[in-house]
Image (tube, rainbow, N blue to C red):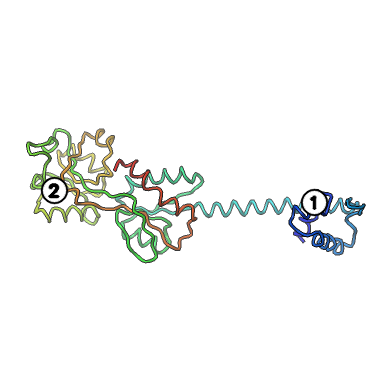
Amino acid sequence: MLEELLVFTTVVEQSSLNKASKLLNLSQPALSRKIAKLEDEWGVALFHRKGKRLELTRVGQEAYLYALEQRQRHQNFLQAVSRFKKAERTVVTLGASLTTIQTTLPPLVKAMMDKFPDIELKLVTGKTHEIVSHVRDKKVDIGVVASSISEAGLKCIPLFQDHLELVVPKGHELASPTQDGHPSMDDLNGRSMIIFSKGTWYRRLVDDLFGRYGIVPDVRMEIDSFEAIVRLLPICKAASLLPRSYLRRPLLRDNGLVSVPIPELEQTRRETCLIYGEKSELTSETKEWFTQIRESLVEELSL
């Protein structure tokens, strides 16, 4: 009956079957049949036919008020459904490996909020293999990991490449260029250093690097917190190898640190990527935006 009521209100408001048929994109015979169906169901006449014009009967006037109420209720219901669907679409669970939380995550979240201001983000943290597993099992909608993932069913979008750099306190022996230019890997042999804890991706990268060049540093501390390493370097007068994406100028300045390039460290490249399931329920607009976020992240991280 709802369809007939909607047709009825349109006919009343247009006062003409011809005008109503054009507005509704229905033939006049089809409109007449829908009006006749209502009159047969209620057993009353809704219109007086005066030539080409239609005028409501007294019962027709009551029917029109009733139809308006039903139309408004229908519109309210559709709006409620739309709000519900919108809320469902904008709740996104974001998974980030521990090595990306302090650098990649803040500018990525800001970019997402700027693009989708109504989005509601939930965060899950873990190691790279855990985040990949969460995305695969649909426990997480989007993952950001410091690794390139090649796995069936997952879409991997490269965000930027990163590499390690030597970081030392101002005044440190390695802070100033030598006569031969920048320090080399050999200068790290026996050097007091603070490095990432075992089990982290950056620790594996550092261990591989030291093994390749035969470096045996004097490891003072092993820590899995980037912030803790940054704060302890000036206190311990030690050196560290940290990802370039972490090393923003204000952070180095505020902690009395300098970044010292070593050519060999440019070989320690690692790609940070955004991953999601190919059958993800994310909107096509969101997926399209993922392919455009790279430039703003590279600019934000000064890479």
Mark 1 in CB contact with mark 2 (< 8 angstroms): no
Circle 1: residue type: Lys
Q: Secondary structure at mark 1?
A: helix
Residue 8 position (above or below residue 259):
below
- Picture quadrant where residue 127 is located: bottom left
x 43%, y 62%: residue: 278
User: Is 217 positioned to the left or the right of 53 in the image?
Assistant: left
Residue drawn at x 77%, y 51% is: 69
In what element is the residue under mark 2? strand
- Tell me the kind of residue under disc 2: Val
Q: Position of residue 276 (x, y in %)?
A: 40, 58
**Crowd around label 1: few <14 · some 14–19 · many ≥20 (10 Å):** some
At horizontal 18% and vertical 44% (from top left) the residue drawn is 240
- Front residue (pair 301, 136): 301
| Sequence order check, earlier mark of 1 and 2 | 1
What residue did someone put label 2 on? 219
Residue 66 in picture, x, y percent from top left: 81, 53
Question: Which disc is residue 130 wearing?
Answer: none
Quadrant of image for the C terminus: top left
In what quadrant of the picture does the N terminus appear?
bottom right
Is 218 left or right of 2, judged from the image as shown?
Answer: left
The disc placed on residue 19 is 1
Q: Position of residue 84 (x, y in %)?
A: 58, 53
288 sits left or right of 213 in the view: right
Could you classify mark 2 by the number of other residues whose Cα lies within 10 Å: few (under 14), some (14-19), or many (20 or more)?
Answer: some
Residue found at the far bottom of this picture: 152
